[in-house]
Amino acid sequence: MKSHWVVKFGGSLLSDRVARGKFLKDAAKIAKKEPLVLVHGGGPEINAALDKMGIKSSWVNGRRVTDEAAMLVVEGVLSGQVNKNLVGELNALGAKAVGLSGRDGGLLRAKPIADLGRVGEPEKADPALLKTLLAAGYLPVISSVAEGPGGALNVNADEAAAAVAMALKAGRLVFMTDVAGVLDENKKTIPVIRLKDIARLIETQTIAGGMVPKVQSCAQAIRRGVKEVHIIDGRAGLLKPVGTRILP
Ligand SMILES: Nc1ncnc2c1ncn2[C@@H]1O[C@H](COP(=O)(O)OP(=O)(O)O)[C@@H](O)[C@H]1O
Ligand SMILES: [Mg+2]
């Protein structure tokens, strides 16, 4: 079987109509020829739903503090609304997309992070269900909700994608974001980042915010044997990648 791709894309890309259409078209095309797994977040959609319900969000180290009430909304939005709309659009493009969350088939187990409520970090991934679906030509689309003690946990979608890639022993892991890859202090794309450079880039705050879990997830995946890891400009599409490659 051909090597697997895992592609993660975030909420900012999803809310850009043009980028979204282009990306889904590319994904449907690739999935017809090669085994592809998509992992998605949905921050802006969650914000909108929580706002509507008058639930306020606070953030600790880039993670949304998620109480029980907020988790109901997070799961409904990510695994329901966002996931099923993506599946519908991909299938309209001729793919055989199947919407899943990390809770299906034991795909993603997470351990809670102290003081953040229903927030967790992936600790175990079981690729069996994905392998079955890929072998039958389906395109799995996974929301970043994992199973944890006492029910659903909200996990960072970058970490979820890395966990899925490592479990599948994927050949390629691609993070599609809303900027032209990892940028330097002059806002220019850094074409290649080595693992040994990452700590310094974070310390000097060249890399900050949502880019931190992304590069850390890249590093973890590379250490666990994923060969090709990229952070690319989602607006440029998946077929002509523009951005940063992370190397050992
Ligand atoms: N060095 C950097 N290069 C690129 N983006 C960076 C960098 N440091 C911080 N960022 C921020 O990280 C954001 C991407 O992460 P995030 O907002 O979580 O998006 P995603 O939906 O792709 O996960 C960029 O839009 C940018 O604001
Ligand atoms: Mg992010």
Image (cartoon, rainbow, N blue to C red):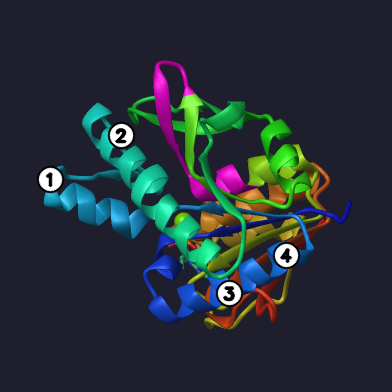
Identify the mark nearer the N-term, 4 or 2: 4
User: Distance from label 3 to label 4 (Cα)?
Assistant: 11 Å
186 vs 112, left or right, is right
Q: For the magenta stretch, what is the residue range?
A: 148-161
Residue count near mark 4 (Cα–Cα under 10 Å), binned few <14, some 14–19, many ≥20: some
Identify the mark nearer the N-term, 1 or 4: 4
Q: Secondary structure at mark 4?
A: helix
Determine the residue located farthest toward the left in the rendered image. 54
Residue corresponding to mark 2: 71
Residue 211 percent coordinates (x, y): 52, 60
Identify the mark nearer the N-term, 2 or 3: 3
Of badges 3 and 4, the one in the foreground is 4
Identify the mark nearer the N-term, 1 or 3: 3
Residue corresponding to mark 1: 53
Residue corresponding to mark 4: 32
Amino acid identity at mark 4: Lys
The residue drawn where x is 51% and y is 67% is: 92
Tell which of 134 and 49 is nearer to you.
134
Residue 193 percent coordinates (x, y): 72, 66
Tell which of 122 and 188 is nearer to you.
122
Residue count near mark 2 (Cα–Cα under 10 Å), binned few <14, some 14–19, many ≥20: many
Residue corresponding to mark 3: 25
Amino acid identity at mark 2: Met
Do tag 1 and tag 3 residues touch (Cβ < 8 Å)? no
Identify the mark nearer the N-term, 1 or 2: 1
Residue 96 percent coordinates (x, y): 62, 56
User: Distance from label 4 to label 2 (Cα)?
Assistant: 34 Å
